[in-house]
Amino acid sequence: MKFKQAAVGAVLALSGLVANAGGSLGVLTEDGESFSSVVSQAGITFDTFSFSLTTLSDVWGGAFKSPRVLGLGVELAQGATVLGADGDVTDGFSFAGLTAGMYTLKFAAFSTGKGSYGGNIAATPVPEPETYAMMLAGLVAVGFLARRRQG
């Protein structure tokens, strides 16, 4: 299993050298966006999908593949910096704590012939520390008032 993940990682690292298809998913939200690609021949196919975030977010998604697509991996990058990778995205993938900005998903599909893959990706905003501080202050105030009414 480690060899398979290492091989997919190596293939993804070299994906910048290969022509790729894909597109823009726009600004990711909780509603999510769909992506898909057609694999036209046996071998390794690369696709790139870009998206942006407007606030600190956790990004998660899932994918499906047709039977001839034997392996499907993904790499997340911001500019030239690789932030994470997953060698088998059919069981889901996630990237936590991403700041606002532009990101790129690079998919690598290994197939024995024509096929396809696709999936969905969404972003969930991460509450900022100030949100927790306000919530804690509110709970303390409610506790104080409840204690005062009893006494």
Image: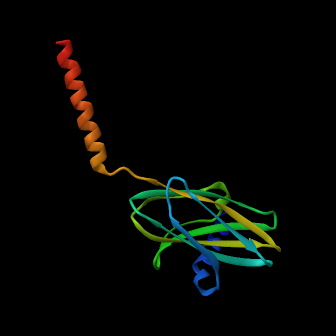
Residue in the image at 20% along x and 13% along y: 150
Residue 72 at x, y percent in the picture? 68, 67
Give above or below for 2 relative to 140.
below
Residue 85 at x, y percent in the picture? 56, 67
Please tell me which residue lies in front, 8 or 147: 147
Give above or below for 59 relative to 72.
above
Residue 35 at x, y percent in the picture? 64, 65
- Residue reaching furthest to the top: 151
Number of callouts = 0
User: In the picture, which quadrant includes the N terminus?
Assistant: bottom right
Colouring: rainbow
Direction from residue 92 to residue 100 in the image, left or right: left
User: In the picture, which quadrant includes the C terminus?
Assistant: top left
Residue in the image at 61% along x and 81% along y: 15
Direction from residue 2 to residue 57 in the image, left or right: left
Quadrant of res 54: bottom left
Direction from residue 44 to residue 104 in the image, left or right: left
Please tell me which residue lies in front, 42 or 6: 42
Give above or below for 65 relative to 23.
above
Please tell me which residue lies in front, 71 or 99: 99
Residue in the image at 29% along x and 49% along y: 129
Residue 116 at x, y percent in the picture? 75, 68
Direction from residue 106 to residue 37 in the image, left or right: right
Residue in the image at 64% along x and 75% along y: 47
